Amino acid sequence: MKRIIVFIALFALLIGIAQAEDYKMTMTTIEGKAMNITGTKEGLVFDDFKGKIIFLEFFGHKCPPCLKSIPHYIDLQTKYKDKLAIIAVEVQGMDEAALRDFVKTKGINYPTISYEKSGDMVPYISQRAQWEGAIPFLVVLDQKGEVQLVQPGMLPQDALEEVIAKLSK
């Protein structure tokens, strides 16, 4: 059943992508760094992470599966820092100052963005992937920025490593 839902979500995203034109967006990390992103027919291109696999994670600070995923992402970012970029967008409304404290407390080692500084990204993903706000929500992009996986719900670390291995070939 889970695979059917993922397939439907991916199919819907691909249909939406096929109809879209390039769309420029900017998100700002909690450190104040602007990220320039282009939405394309195939996916998303992050200017700062060209040539890397990207895990774009929408999460919440009160979401148990989201919290459980954080140590996995920290490990993966450390282990695959040369080929992987993890980008997290907090969507449960935590303000920027509180999110900075949260990131420090959890030891998060990847760019994190508050909802208020995510620009058009959340509505863009909502429209393109028919995402209705369930979290965690992961979009995996290959080195060209093409969508390879849309995953509502948490994936265990070994499954995430399989995705990295597959896309690294």
Image: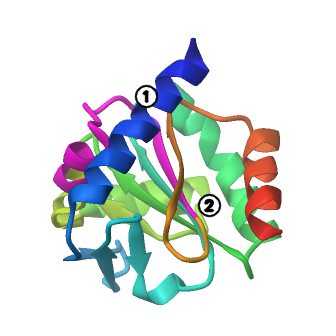
- Left or right: 104 as drawn, with respect to 41: right
Residue 8: mark in rendering? 1
The N terminus, quarter of image: top right
Give the residue at x 35% y 29%.
Answer: 134
Q: Is residue 140 magenta?
A: yes
Q: Which residues are magenta?
A: 123-141
Q: Which residue is mark 2?
A: 107
Q: Residues within 10 Å of mark 1 (few under 14, many from 20)?
A: some
Give the residue at x 49% y 46%.
Answer: 138
Q: Position of residue 27 (x, y in %)?
A: 27, 73
Depicted 110 relative to depicted 156: above or below: below
Depicted 168 relative to depicted 62: above or below: below
In this view of the protein, can residue 70 be seen by the observer?
yes
Give the residue at x 17% y 67%.
Answer: 119
Q: Is residue 149 magenta?
A: no
Q: Position of residue 37 (x, y in %)?
A: 32, 78
Extreme top residue here?
Answer: 1
Give the residue at x 79% y 57%.
Answer: 166
Q: Nearer the viewer, mark 1 or mark 2?
A: 1
Q: Secondary structure at mark 2?
A: loop
Q: Position of residue 66 (x, y in %)?
A: 51, 36
Q: Secondary structure at mark 1?
A: helix
The C terminus, quarter of image: bottom right
- The three-letter amino acid code for the residue at tag 1 is Ile
- Label 1 vs label 2: CA separation? 35 Å
